[in-house]
Image (cartoon, rainbow, N blue to C red):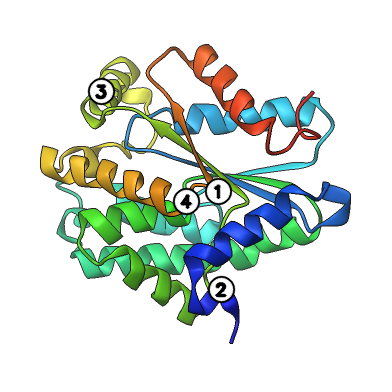
Amino acid sequence: MDPAESSPQWWQGVRTALTLQRRPEDRAGLLISFEGVDGSGKTTQARRLAEALRRAGWSVVLTREPGGTPLGEQFRRILLQPPPLPAAGLTPRTELLLYLADRAQHLQEVVEPALQSRQVVISDRFIDSTLAYQGVARGFGIETLIEVHQKLGLLRWPDCTILLGVDPRVGLQRKRRQAQTSGPTIPLAEWSRFEREDATFHQSVAEGYRRLAEMFPDRIVVVPADADPDAVFQRVQAALRPRFPWLLP
């Protein structure tokens, strides 16, 4: 039996330790994900890291979940459109299955080919979002969803996950300000559907991320995100350099 199937937690630590000892020319690419509650700033930080790595000469694929593929973008619209559009009626089970379908397409069409081409893949949300939002906040269970990913062939852990730590109340305030200042030019108001969940839901998401950080300390790096974007990006770089000293100048 694959050790990853029998004990994903300890095997992840071993796999990460092996990964960190290898330069990109010795391995098949590098996958870095950004995670956090709504309004934590992960989209901004993912984009800034991609820009910095491209300036340093790396071939970078910047992607996101849900989305990242043409089909995935259709899933994204269904999942994130705010009420009173049809997505308001999604059941938790339907929501979970759509996220899994999105990940299956994303892995096959974008992530795995880029890694095999030895590119750096930066994903704005990945598997940990499902484990925190659907596993904890929706109540399906972290261990259950890890097992589902295993059985479906979708269990692909990032090499490193930057978890932007911010109080969910602060994150929601940021999202509201963003919506107010963006006005009619804002693209899909993707903050609205989850933003309208109650405070208990958002606290559960934050608790889910806390549990994941404890479960996978070698992979998940918690970066305080309670400062301006420039300061947070300095913290992101400081978190990555000890793990990948060859990556950033």
The residue where tag 3 is placed is: 170
Determine the secondary structure under disc 3. helix
Horizontal arrangement in the rendering, residue 84 relative to residue 194 (left or right):
left
Nearer-N-terminus badge (4/3): 4
Q: Quadrant of residue 194?
A: top left
Point out residue 17 in the picture as x, y percentages from the top left corner: 67, 53
Badge 2 vs badge 4, beta-carbon distance below 8 Å: no
Tell me the number on the disc at residue 141: none
Nearer to us of marks 1 and 3 is 1
Dot 4 crowding, Cα within 10 Å, few <14, some 14–19, many 20+: many
Tell me the number on the disc at residue 4: 2
Point out residue 39 in the picture as x, y percentages from the top left corner: 34, 29
The residue where tag 4 is placed is: 65
Nearer-N-terminus badge (1/2): 2
Q: Amino acid at mark 2?
A: Ala
Q: Amino acid at mark 3?
A: Val
The residue where tag 1 is placed is: 219
- The residue drawn where x is 73% and y is 57% is 115
Q: Amino acid at mark 4?
A: Glu
Nearer to us of marks 4 and 3 is 3
Q: Quadrant of the C terminus?
A: top right
The foreground one among 231 and 186 is 231
Horizontal arrangement in the rendering, residue 51 relative to residue 116 (left or right):
left
The foreground one among 202 and 216 is 216
Determine the secondary structure under disc 2. helix
Nearer-N-terminus badge (1/3): 3
